Image (cartoon, rainbow, N blue to C red):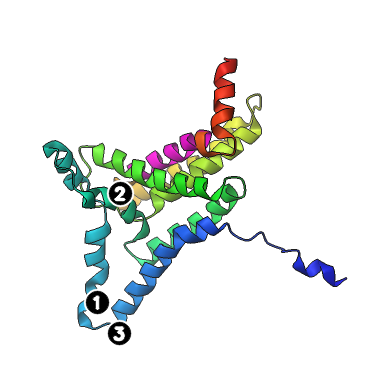
Amino acid sequence: MHHGYNEKPVNPLPTVVWILVAPMIVTEIIFALANTGVMGTSAIGWRYEILGQLGFDPEGFRRMIAVQDWSVRPLATLISYAFVHTSLTHAAFVVVFTLAIGKFVGEVFAGWAVAAVFLGASILGGLVYALMPFTSGFLIGGYPGAYGLIGAFTWLLWMKLGPGDPNRMRAFSLIGMLAGLQLVFGALFGARPDWIAQFAGFGVGFLLSFIVAPGGWRHLLRKLRKR
């Protein structure tokens, strides 16, 4: 009866999900070590220095567009900001979210498609954030990318329920719940404009799924031709 042993009781997490969270985990380990003073006293403020380097600055980005002076660094921070966090708690929430939702999405989507959703949501979520004239704080952390994965997860549920299903809108209950939580936290602690990037990330993840899902583009064209 020993043949049952190689049946894995839990599906392993898709590799791509580990690749996405690895830099988040590694940077937290480096910050934790730096804070102990092991790396010398100058390392203690590393988190803030690194956030200043890798965080996405919407005002700087708007200035760059205004003067048409394109430089690589502000563009690179549209990706790098997703992998650094303001605190261990911030990083832990993003990692757990990305692993949990990434597992569901990665069971259907190819690895590259999961990465495309996370990175696409981070980049376009950041752009939407920067294009709002009132945003000033640095954008930091993987929430917009994680919300992109929630968008893809919602798309999967929405497709599964199909056009005729009266419960189809229930696919949006997770994002609805998160929006509710954001409102409550905003009312209690003051809203940060980061939610703009997060919900834009959700929209990007949902819409990208039409293209990157298995057979997505062909499926979409067939649907449009039927109209």
Judged from the image, the secondary structure of the residue bearing numbered disc 3 is loop
Is any atom of residue 177 visible in this view? no
* Residue 72 lies in the magenta-colored region: no
Residue at horizontal 76%, vertical 67%? 6
Res 44 label: 1
Q: x, y percentage for residue 31?
A: 32, 72
Which residue in the structure is indicated by mark 3? 38
Among the two numbered marks 1 and 2 on one chain, the one whose residue lies closer to the N terminus: 1
Q: Label 3 is placed on what type of residue?
A: Val
Q: Label 1 is placed on what type of residue?
A: Ile
Q: Label 2 is placed on what type of residue?
A: Leu
Q: x, y percentage for residue 139?
A: 28, 51
Q: Which residues are magenta?
A: 196-210
Judged from the image, the secondary structure of the residue bearing numbered disc 2 is helix
C-alpha gap between disc 1 and disc 2: 26 Å
- Which residue is nearer to you in this view: 128 or 20? 20
Residue at horizontal 59%, vertical 23%? 222
Instruction: State the image quarter where residue 153 is shown.
Output: top right
Instruction: State the image quarter where residue 10 is shown.
Output: bottom right
Q: Are marks 3 and 1 in contact (CB under 8 Å)?
A: no
- Which residue is nearer to you in this view: 147 or 218? 218
Res 78 label: 2
C-alpha gap between disc 3 and disc 1: 9 Å
Left or right of residue 63, residue 94 in this image: right
* Label 1: few (<14), some (14–19) or many (≥20) C-alpha neighbours in 10 Å: some
Q: x, y percentage for residue 69?
A: 14, 42
Extreme-left residue of the structure: 67
